[in-house]
Image (cartoon, rainbow, N blue to C red):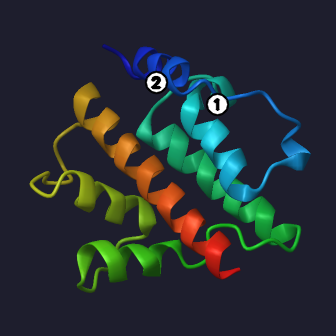
């Protein structure tokens, strides 16, 4: 199964409701993205998703929003409990595939695993941020 098929099936299961993006919280907006990343970026891949999220973070900062501030530190504190020089995309890969060597090409199943972990952890981080903020 390819990534777009996997996420299309997932979207049907959770039935995201179309909404005006301006009325959504950051968490709601990124949940919409997570349900169907291919609809936002044209195809689904780890690289495409992380590039979209990096752009989202940059745009949020340009408009005065928090973006993904604290996400990397949150991942280190809550899921790795050790230091790392990786940016958040590398940390997600470490968490999702602890035995992966970072050299071997990812299989479609590994990409699905990484994206599932990314979307789950991002949602948890944003939920915690909403509670605190």
Establish if 75 lies above or below 120. below
Q: Which image quarter holds the N terminus?
A: top left
**Residue situated furthest left in the rendering:** 99
- Quick one: SS at disc 1? helix
Specify the label residue 76 is tagged with. Answer: none
Front in this rendered view, residue 102 or 13: 13
Q: Which image quarter holds the C terminus?
A: bottom right
Q: Nearer the viewer, mark 1 or mark 2?
A: 2
81 vs 3, left or right, is: left
Please state the total of marks drawn on the protein image: 2
Does the rendering let one see residue 39? yes
80 vs 127, left or right, is: left
Instruction: Identify residue for label 2.
Output: 10
Q: What residue is at 48 percent from the left and 62 percent from the top?
A: 124
* Mark 1 Cα-neighbour bin, 10 Å: few <14, some 14–19, many ≥20: some
Front in this rendered view, residue 57 or 128: 128
Establish if 84 lies above or below 87. below
Q: What residue is at 65 percent from the left and 29 percent from the top?
A: 16
Specify the label residue 41 is tagged with. Answer: 1
- Quick one: SS at disc 2? helix
Does the rendering let one see residue 107? no
């Amino acid at each position: 199964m390819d990534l777009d098929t996997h996420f299309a099936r997932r979207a049907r299961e959770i039935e995201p409701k179309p909404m005006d993006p301006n009325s959504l919280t950051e968490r709601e907006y990124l949940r919409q993205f997570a349900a169907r990343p291919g609809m936002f970026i044209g195809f689904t891949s780890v690289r495409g998703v992380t590039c979209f999220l990096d752009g989202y973070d940059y745009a949020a900062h340009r408009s005065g929003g928090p973006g993904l501030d604290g996400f990397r530190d949150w991942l280190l504190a809550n899921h790795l409990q050790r230091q790392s020089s990786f940016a958040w995309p590398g940390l997600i890969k470490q968490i999702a595939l602890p035995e992966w060597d970072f050299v071997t090409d990812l299989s479609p199943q590994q990409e699905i695993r990484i994206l599932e972990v990314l979307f789950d952890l991002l949602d948890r981080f944003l939920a915690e941020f909403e509670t605190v903020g």
